[in-house]
Image (cartoon, rainbow, N blue to C red):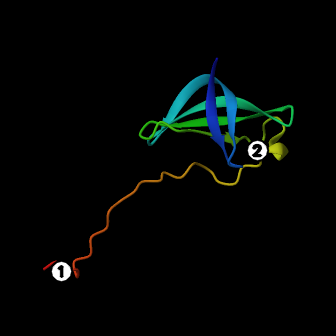
Amino acid sequence: MQRQMVQCEDGRQRQARIYGIPREEGVFTIYQAGVRVKGKHVTGEAWFNRKSGIWYFFSAPDGKNPHLLPRRCPKPECTETRILRSPSIRTF
């Protein structure tokens, strides 16, 4: 078990306890995890983005105390910045 600071869906940073066998999905490595919210333990998943190095936490709907930190989306959004070039722009 290791401890890691994670970004929760409510926008707050919390310390998570990460355990279990990891699985991979795209650029994410997913672990079982748990955080403390209002003095109670919430179980879920910690998603690690290997590109950006950011940790996310999502509660499990069938886990312990999911009502304290409801899951709003199925997985974290990958925020990549891309430069768009328009072919109609000319430089003189």
Residue lying at 62% horizontally and 31% vertically, measured from the top left: 5
Residue lying at 65% horizontally and 54% vertically, measured from the top left: 73
Residue lying at 78% horizontally and 36% vertically, measured from the top left: 63
Q: Residues within 10 Å of mark 2 (few under 14, many from 20)?
A: some
User: Rounded to the nearest whole Å, what is the CA distance between mark 1 and mark 2?
Assistant: 52 Å
Q: Is residue 21 above or below residue 24?
A: above
Most extreme residue toward the left is 92
Compared across the picture, whether 80 is left or right of 13 comes to left
Most extreme residue toward the top is 1
Q: Secondary structure at mark 2?
A: loop
Q: Nearer the viewer, mark 1 or mark 2?
A: 1
Position of the N terminus by quadrant: top right
Compared across the picture, whether 37 is left or right of 4 comes to right
Task: Provide the residue designation for mark 2.
Answer: 61
Task: Provide the residue designation for mark 1.
Answer: 90
The image quadrant that residue 45 belongs to is top right
Looking at marks 1 and 2 on the same chain, the residue that comes earlier in the sequence is marked by: 2
Amino acid type of the residue that numbered disc 2 sits on in the rendered structure:
Pro
